[in-house]
Amino acid sequence: MNLPRLKFSGKLSTSDKLYNFFATLTGLAIFTTEFFKQVFIPPFEIREIKKHMDELGVKTFGIVSITGIILGLVLTMQSQPVMQRFGASDFLPAMVSISVVRELGPVITALIFAGRVSSGIGAELGSMRVTEQIDAMEVSAINPFKYLVVTRIIATTLILPILTIYVMVIAIMGGYIAVIIVENMNFAYYQSAVVSAVQFGDLIPGVAKTFVFGFIVGIVGAYKGYSTEGGTEGVGKASTTAVVLSSLIILIFDTILVKITVWLWPTI
């Protein structure tokens, strides 16, 4: 697999930056194509996938838990004065829950996940590349792409939806904590309002697009790490650019997926 080489030496001109931009897009497309070629070819390395789901997903529960609680608290406390101004305080649980389930939960979780996981994958594979461990695997007749890349991408694709559902629940509970602080509302009413507001059609698009976000996090991190050049300095750049690029692509795809969702489910 021949990936385009980026220019790093010296001060980059405008043409060099433009070249790097299109080279990155081209390399990412080639890398993605290679993934889909090899993902259905045995062996499937199930044990490695489970290990990466634990390392990349389960160990992220701490940071996403804090994020979910703060998301619910801040959203509720910021929205309550506005809702109260229009005499719609009773609709506060519905507004918070729908906002979290449809958009804020999936996107915020994906960005947090990208910040922790995409940089980690980029740094780990980048270190293996510059220390020639990947080359050694190729010499040993081991397919490094299958073993190192495919397993990580599958793991991120599968674990992010689980994290997202968890964050949605935590954020809604955080909203209830904020409601107790700013409003005199009991839990039974809050729960009833949330259940009445959130429909199954709201949950499907929000969770479904996190499969795409998880794939983006895995493929970008793996691509930047696998194509690392320039020694330890290149590893640092790969880790940083993996976070920036994956976050940017997530936001772009979110815009596209929201439009598709509105087109497929116009009544949502």
Image: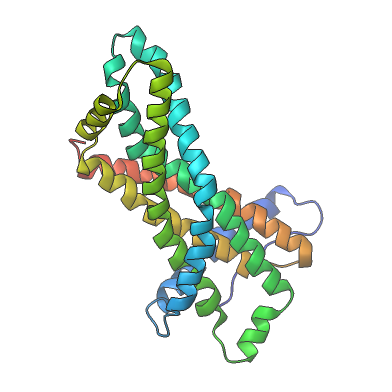
Q: Position of residue 129 (x, y in %)?
A: 68, 73
> Residue 16 appears at what percent x and percent y?
70, 54
Residue 131: which quarter of the image? Answer: bottom right
**Which part of the image, by quadrant, shows the C terminus?**
top left
Front position in the image: 5 or 65? 65
Residue 55 occupies quadrant:
bottom right
What is the quadrant of the N terminus in the image?
A: bottom right
x 53%, y 60%: residue: 56
Q: Residue 155's x, y, as percent? A: 45, 65
Judge from the rendering whether residue 216 lies leftward or rightward of residue 200; answer left or right.
right
Up/down of 231 relative to 136, above or below: above
Q: Is residue 94 above or below residue 265?
A: above
Residue for point 32% across, 21% down: 92
Q: Is residue 191 left or right of residue 63?
A: left
Residue at the image point whose x is 46% and y is 45% from the top: 109
Would you say residue 63 is visible in this rendering? yes
